[in-house]
Image (spheres, grey):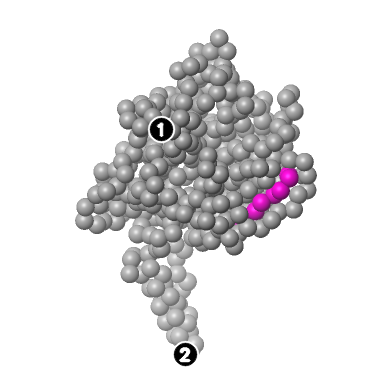
Amino acid sequence: MNNYLRAISGLGLALSFSMSVQAQGAAPTAPAAAPPPAWKQGMPANMADSKLAPLPGKLVATKAADVPIDKIKLPPGFKVEVWADSIPGARAIAEGEGGKYYIGTRALGRIYEVTDNGKERTSRVVVDKLNQPTAAYKDGSLYVVAVDKVLRFDGIAKNPNAAPVDLTAKFNLPPLPHHNWKYVAFGPDGKLYMPFGAPCNICELPTPEYAQIRTYNPDGSGMQVVATGVRNTVGFDWHPVTKELWFSNHGRDWMGDDKPNDTMHRLKLKANYGFPYCHEGNMPDPDVTKANACAGVEPPVAMMGPHAAAMGVKFYSGDMFPAEYKNVMFNARKGSWNRTQKIGFDVVTVRADADGKNAKVEPFMTGFMNPADQSFWGRPAYLHQMKDGSMLVSDEQNGVIYRVTYSK
């Protein structure tokens, strides 16, 4: 029995004993202290006084005029504008039809529909009060995936009142939360790719259905596990030439400022990526241990920085940007909280050979954080390439979407 199950079993025995004593007329015992928040799980005793904690989002509407866009820095020739605003908590972007884009959120539980008429953008809430929903689009249907629900909206681009088809039962979703927010997308094979993060910061998995990447047919049938040992991927894309899936992965917290790194990987079918026993491909975990912890673990393509929150992944395949960006990966790093000196809060490029070798991480879109005083005003989260070759970047902190263009 692993530690997770022992804790649950012990809690049940304690509760039974307490109820038995009270039934015999004894004075009731004081209520147990509330458990620590999930983000503190794995914190060592010598860091009990740490002031580090997750950074709260604004989650209120921000207008374009209130975004200090002049602080954003890009390479020469690139420009940025606020493409859409007032979308609190904006995360992943899925493109539909007829100029419609679908934006997932986390804390607010909403899916937004943004309509672009070529001159301006308007938005509405498609669905609300879900548990951390995200979205994908295929063949005229919007797929909304939450922690505990899968809904399909058919023909929504033409019928804004389309009623959802509930597919939840067909997807057999694991129930435990924590790293259960999902980035989902349809691959070149027509399958829906869906990750299931670890239900903890660091622990032996309570059941094997966590720390996985799965694929499904659009109707929820044909489920396959394509990777294990993936702690928390919330961003992936397919290489334009090789069609291989590349994905970001968040490292665990509370191992210090400089380890482990978030990582970037190529998907190798049925490969194991190490969680919970091994990080970075060669770093055994100090708390959850086993012999030869890193034996057979698939190594990462690139190190993305410790606690940097490597989020959205997008290979550039358009023609607007200079030729040296063709087939180059972009990665949004939302920014660290579990680190004394903040890093991330930017968009970087990952240049690597098609086989994943010789990876080099370089800054692309910066200025959201001031290293001098550690203040930040924005947190880039996800990326989407538009048909004209420009790039959309969501800012979860401000609830806006930027559009990055290039001209000589």
Magenta span contains residue 84: no
Residue 254 seen in the current view: no
Q: Position of residue 24 (x, y in %)?
A: 47, 90
Q: Position of residue 30 (x, y in %)?
A: 46, 73
Residue 149 is left or right of residue 113, and the answer is left
Magenta span contains residue 152: yes
Which residue is located at x 71 percent, y 48 percent?
A: 154
Locate the C terminus by quadrant: top right
Q: Residues within 10 Å of mark 2 (few under 14, many from 20)?
A: few
Residue with the most extreme top position: 408
Mark 1 vs 2, N-terminal side = 2
Locate the N terminus by quadrant: bottom left
Which residue is located at x 39 percent, y 73 percent?
A: 9
Say which of 241 and 238 sits in front: 241
Amino acid, disc 1 = Ile
| Residue position for label 1 | 343
Q: In the figure, 176 relative to 96: above or below?
A: below
Labelled pair 1, 2 in contact (Cβ < 8 Å)? no
Q: Position of residue 281 (x, y in %)?
A: 29, 43
SS of the residue under disc 2: loop
Residue 85, quarter of the rendered image: top right
Label 1 – label 2 distance at C-alpha: 57 Å
Which residue is located at x 54 percent, y 47 percent?
A: 191
| Residue position for label 2 | 24
Residue 81 seen in the current view: yes
Residue range in magenta is: 148-156
Amino acid, disc 2 = Gln
Which residue is located at x 50 percent, y 50 percent?
A: 215
Residue 212 is left or right of residue 105, and the answer is left
Q: Position of residue 303 (x, y in %)?
A: 35, 35
Tell me the mark number nearer the camera, choosing from 1 and 2: 1
Residue 339 is left or right of residue 313, and the answer is left
